[in-house]
Amino acid sequence: MMMKAYPEPEDIKRMEKEATNWRDFLLVRMLFHLGCRISELLSIETKDIDLMAGTVTIRHLKIRLKVSCPKCGFRLGKHHTYCPGCGSEVKDVITAEKEHKRVRTLPLDKESLDMLKEYIERGGPVKKGDKYLLFGINRHRAWQIVRDLAEKAGIPRLVNPETGRVHYVSPHRLRNGFAVNAVKRDDSGDGLRLLQEHLGHSSFNTTARYRKVSGEESRKWYDKLWGEDQDGA
């Protein structure tokens, strides 16, 4: 069997059929249908789901480290020995962690939303403190669920197209599958820009890599070489 670089829609359906409970079913489905990071998915609360608007709000928390000169307050790089602002030797630095919250609201298909509604009504979410988390499991458990469902569904391991290394099907590979599927359907400039926003990439170059992985870029280039009759050598 030829190895693939990413899971495809039919693979996800096979994995969903192997799920024995709503939580595992929705975990796989939402990773592929939302294309979000596993850390983002596991942080989703019931209040983040707007059934009327058909959207899910993703709250990604990133820690920024601020380092300043204790004398003049000039912003320092982690490798500075002397302050560029006042010239004093920097022996001690002032560090402060700042939380930088990035929020994006993603659309979700109606079928998945209907399943989420039923899952919530059946009491699926888990209460932790003052939060009602959609899944209430950690990253390691989520990784196990995805890997096990892929194996039960008979999906072979995936090969990294850049390194050639072989990996189990994982939550991040499902995110990759979403991105590649999106590029195959629409690789226009607007399509890639919307995909960048959807995935939460700060750099367009990161998103553009999926065009290469999908094989569409190479195919279009080759078709241009041979798409018209050639006059001969």
Image (tube, helix red, strand yellow):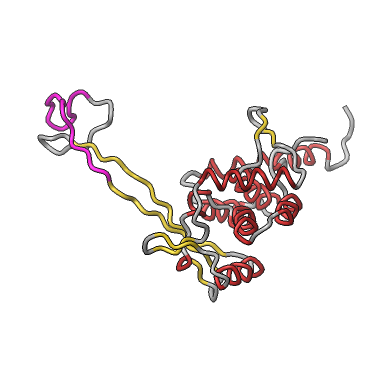
The quadrant holding residue 160 is top right
Residues drawn in magenta: 81-97
The answer to whether residue 212 is left or right of residue 44 is right
Residue drawn at point x = 48 percent, y = 44 percent: 203
Tell me if residue 32 comes above or below residue 157 in the rendering: below
Tell me if residue 16 comes above or below residue 114 in the rendering: above
Quarter of the image containing the C terminus?
top right
- Magenta span contains residue 85: yes
Front-lying residue, 11 or 62? 11
Residue drawn at point x = 47 percent, y = 61 percent: 133
Q: Position of residue 196 (x, y in %)?
A: 54, 51
Asked if one can make out residue 190 in the rendered structure from this viewpoint, the answer is no
- Magenta span contains residue 115: no
The answer to whether residue 109 is left or right of residue 66 is right
Residue drawn at point x = 67 percent, y = 54 percent: 186
Q: Position of residue 31 (x, y in %)?
A: 60, 53
